[in-house]
Image (cartoon, helix red, strand yellow):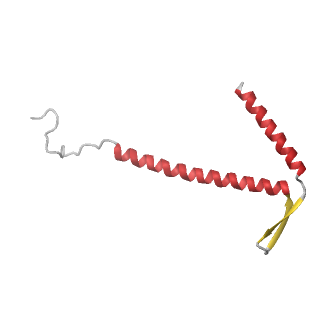
Amino acid sequence: MMGVVRWLVGAALFLALLFLSLDNAEVVTLRFFRVASWQAPLVFVVFVAFVAGVAIGLASGALRNARLRRQVRRLRRESSPREPSPSGPTDGHPPFGVG
């Protein structure tokens, strides 16, 4: 049932964006600081801006995810029990079963 709803929402969104793009197919001019200009269909400009936004969002999320993974790894290393040293305990008490 949830899959059907997802497909219906996806199809409705696709159709809405399709009709929006067909209504905005005129050519626009982008000017870059009065140095250069570029002409392209408005739908293409909007699509490029959308893709750039998604790419920036995914990159920032991936960087944050990597930073959090490093932090979790470091915290796990710090909180894991230490291996006993070969020379015995260092707190002055004899090991279990001795004494």
* Residue shown at 63% from the left, 50% from the top: 58
Number of marks in the image? 0
From the image, which quarter does the N terminus lie in? top right
Farthest residue, direction top: 1
* Residue shown at 44% from the left, 49% from the top: 71
Task: Determine whether, in the image, residue 61 is placed left or right of residue 17.
Answer: left
Q: Position of residue 28 (x, y in %)?
A: 86, 62
Farthest residue, direction bottom: 35
Q: Position of residue 14 (x, y in %)?
A: 81, 41
Q: Nearer the viewer, residue 86 or 99?
A: 99
Residue 80: which quarter of the image?
top left
Q: Is the residue 37 above or below the residue 7 in the image? A: below
Task: Determine whether, in the image, residue 92 is placed left or right of residue 72.
Answer: left
From the image, which quarter does the C terminus lie in? top left
Task: Determine whether, in the image, residue 88 is placed left or right of residue 22.
Answer: left
* Residue shown at 58% from the left, 50% from the top: 62
* Residue shown at 85% from the left, 61% from the top: 40
Residue 17: which quarter of the image?
top right
Q: Position of residue 4 (x, y in %)?
A: 75, 28
Q: Is the residue 52 above or below the residue 85 in the image? A: below
